Amino acid sequence: MRRYVSRITDWSMPFASWAYCEAAPKTYASCCAKTIEDPLKDKDKRNPVSDMLIDGFGRMHTYLRISLTERCNLRCHYCMPAEGVELTPPPQLLSHHEILRLANLFVTSGVDKIRLTGGEPTLRKDIQDICLSLSALKGLKTLAITTNGITLARKLPMLKQCGVTSLNISLDTLVPAKFEFLTRRKGHQRVMDSINAAIDFGYNPVKVNCVVMRGFNDDEMCDFVNLTRDKPINIRFIEFMPFDGNVWNVKKLVPYSEMLDTVSKQFPSLKKLHDHPTETAKNFKIDGYMGTVSFITSMTEHFCAGCNRLRLLADGNFKVCLFGPSEVKRKKASHAGMFEISKTANRPMIHIGG
């Protein structure tokens, strides 16, 4: 752990030194069946936000995303280069105890939401133990997972019991053949089964992430919206973003304005909802529909002013912006424009974890 923690010492030396001094974490039950009924109850009061989590523009970083692994059971074009990526050797990835110790430091400093990402986080063999440990942290209000849904349905009963309170499931097409082309793998029905299982287990909303790409799935947007008619689904249309190896091209980008126009023409009762200042999505509701529709506009209308996110990568590296490596105190007011980002070296998405 000392090697990993040293990578964020420039962010705050006192913060890193706490990690050295903190007592070893206690051992948690290996079976989530032993967890308390609701690991996150009685946590309405979060810990005070430390100055170390506040940047030069007054943004309080209370949301930590932790990548559990660089491995994935899909090979999506926009996430992984066609030639693949060199994965970090397992011994150099953060262990369960290292994740817990770092997460505890963040939570005691004011973080109240943690999202587990990857790669594909459900591939981590000890994910249930990690969730149980994290959900027990005093001051944590939300424990979320972003997953591709391939193995989620069978793991969901235990994950819910271990304290997972929120789910984002990635699905970019409703056509099985297109799914196989995009992901270079089969599994469309398994993702659909996971979405339905999440609904059955009471997750509300079940967030479905859809990266919209011109000429591939932009003709399916209204079909996705129809999923929200009778189910508590939040469809989240995401602008295509550039990362190393994903061959980003502005011609593939469908801007927010165009996506909104497409949906509103088909669903004229689409109405804007009030968004929290830290919200990354622009949220909408259709009259009579159970679910909601959102747009994540990273490229054309950035939401940097309210950004409260931090990212701990699976290899122990640290990012305060999806598109930049700056430490908290040196975080910029906003990221560069889309064309500058496309020319800037960055890790492949599979390494970052979203």
Image (cartoon, helix red, strand yellow):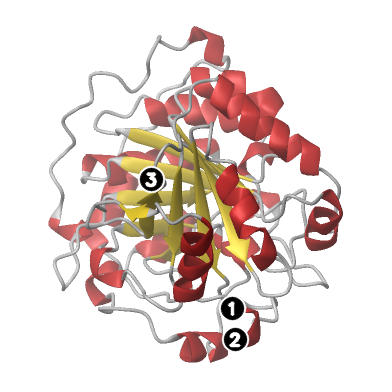
**Residue at image x 63%, y 70%?**
348
Residue at mark 2: 250
Answer yes or no: is residue 320 visible: yes
Q: Amino acid at mark 2?
A: Val
Q: Is residue 109 above or below residue 266?
A: above
Residue at mark 3: 102
Image position, residue 293 (x, y; %): 46, 51
**Front in this rendered view, residue 132 or 273:** 273
Q: Is residue 145 above or below residue 26?
A: below
Residue at mark 1: 253
**Residue at image x 15%, y 48%?**
49
What is the CA distance from the residue labelled 1 to the residue labelled 3?
36 Å
What is the CA distance from the residue labelled 3 to the residue labelled 2?
38 Å
Which class describes the residues within 10 Å of circle 1: few (<14), some (14-19), or many (20+)? many
Q: Amino acid at mark 3?
A: Leu
Image position, residue 67 (x, y; %): 53, 51
Give the image quarter of residue 158. Answer: top right
In terms of secondary structure, where does tag 3 sit? helix
Sequence order check, earlier mark of 1 and 3:
3
What is the CA distance from the residue labelled 2 to the residue labelled 1?
5 Å
**Residue at image x 22%, y 71%?**
329
Tell us which disc is closer to us: 1 or 3. 1
**Residue at image x 44%, y 55%?**
294
**Front in this rendered view, residue 340 or 257:** 257
Which class describes the residues within 10 Å of circle 3: few (<14), some (14-19), or many (20+)? many
Left/right placement of residue 246 relative to residue 315 reads right
Q: Is residue 219 above or below residue 273?
A: below
Image position, residue 12 (x, y; %): 25, 63
Image position, residue 50 (x, y; %): 15, 52
